[in-house]
Amino acid sequence: MDYKSIGKKIRKERIIRNLTLEQLAEILDLSPSYMGLIERGQRGISIETLYKLAIAFDVTTDYLISSDGDEDISEDIFSCNVLYQKILAHIKKYSTEELKFLLEFIELKNKHDSQSSK
């Protein structure tokens, strides 16, 4: 495993999600200084922490540990992840009724789109 490559990806994903090093460390139940060592590739990462990171970033563990040659993943995927995170940040504030309305809207749009493509 290339710790520098893993650390670089972790930092990239953290920045995409507008998280500080301290916020990510808190999510992972690590000290900020240790998290900094991981991001700089100066310390290894446990499987448990790798799993927590994958969940926090909505990526696979394979992506996090893959070599730099595999880093050419489509920018569309990153854009979608960022959009997904922004949408989640907004809908966390919604009431149950607002969420039901949003779901009905999405289902109606999908139905309309599928009928239009026929």
Image: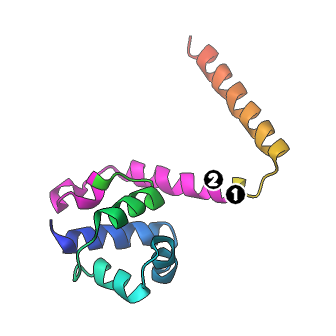
Q: Quadrant of residue 63?
A: bottom left
Question: Which disc, if any, is residue 87?
Answer: 2
Q: Amino acid at mark 2?
A: Ile
82 left or right, relative to 53 = right
Region of the chain picked out in magenta, as a range = 62-89
Crowd tier of the residue under label 1, counting other residues whose Cα lies within 10 Å: few below 14, some 14–19, many 20 or above: few
Task: Please give the residue where the numbered disc 1 appears in the rendered image.
Answer: 90
27 left or right, relative to 91 = left
Q: Quadrant of residue 117?
A: top right
Q: Is residue 42 above or below residue 24?
A: below
Q: Residue at x 52, y 72 (%)?
A: 18
Which secondary structure dominates the residues rendered in magenta? helix
Who is closer to the viewer here, 104 or 48? 48
41 left or right, relative to 84 = left
Q: Quadrant of residue 43?
A: bottom left
Q: Is residue 16 above or below residue 94?
A: below
Name the element at disc 2: helix
Residue 2 on the magenta span: no
